[in-house]
Image (spheres, rainbow, N blue to C red):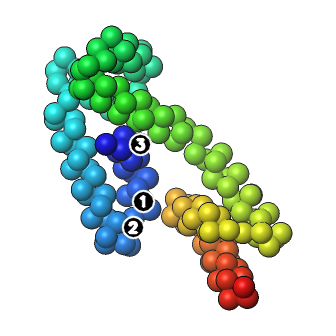
Amino acid sequence: MNFKSMANLEQEKMMARGNPQKMAECVAKRAELASVIDGHFNEEFPFVKSFNADHLESLKTLAEENSDDESAQIRYKLQKERYAVSGASKTAHIDKRLTKTNLTQKLQDGNVSPVDLKAAEKLARQNSTPENLVLYSTIKKQLENGGEEQ
């Protein structure tokens, strides 16, 4: 079970836009998440959509004390990943700015890689300003031209 993927469904949905196969995968993952929630969370241990460090700590303690309880392990792992995603979203605006700066610098240096293309695509999907779309297109063209020369 990939808890990181389950916790990052919104991100995956955003990256899947325009690709029917990826959109179908997101729907399947959402159904898997719903199944996990139904199977391992209940009134005593609810699935918390908002995040509270105390709740996460109590799940961790319960998971450590009941190492043979699969549901306790799953509840903790899923909520931990969701908490991490929530924390990362608080600094997303800074991350976007740093990504744009780094990609622009790499492009000027002529030192872009397929990983940079993926980062530019993500940036363009998250914030589709003309500048970000041009950055993505330019990196893509540079990679295509570099690939032809080799």
Density class for disc 3 (Cα within 10 Å; few <14, some 14-19, many ≥20) is some
Instruction: Name the residue that disc number 3 marks.
Output: 4
Q: Amino acid at mark 2?
A: Arg
Looking at the image, do the residues carrying marks 3 and 1 touch, with CB atoms under 8 Å apart?
no
Q: Percent from the top left, x then y, of residue 108?
A: 81, 70
- Residue 145 seen in this snapshot: no
Q: Percent from the top left, x then y, of residue 142?
A: 70, 80
Instruction: Name the residue that disc number 2 marks.
Output: 17
- Relative to 128, is 60 on the left or the right? left
- Residue 83 seen in this snapshot: yes
Q: Nearer the viewer, residue 141 or 67?
A: 67
Q: Percent from the top left, x then y, of residue 141?
A: 66, 82
Q: Amino acid at mark 3?
A: Lys
Q: Taking 14 as reference, is 137 above or below it?
A: below
Q: Identify the residue shown where x is 63% and y is 77%.
A: 140
Looking at the image, do the residues carrying marks 1 and 2 touch, with CB atoms under 8 Å apart?
yes
Q: Quadrant of the N terminus?
A: top left
Quarter-wise, where is residue 79 in the image?
Answer: top left
- Relative to 127, is 143 on the left or the right? right
Q: Measure the alpha-carbon separation of dots 1 and 2.
A: 6 Å
Q: Residue furthest bottom?
A: 148
Label number found at residue 14: 1
Q: Identify the residue shown where x is 24% and y is 20%.
A: 69
Q: Percent from the top left, x then y, of residue 57?
A: 41, 16
Density class for disc 2 (Cα within 10 Å; few <14, some 14-19, many ≥20) is few
- Find numbered disc 2 in the image and state the secondary structure of the residue it sits on: loop
Q: Identify the residue shown where x is 64% and y is 48%.
A: 95
Density class for disc 1 (Cα within 10 Å; few <14, some 14-19, many ≥20) is some
Looking at the image, do the residues carrying marks 2 and 3 touch, with CB atoms under 8 Å apart?
no
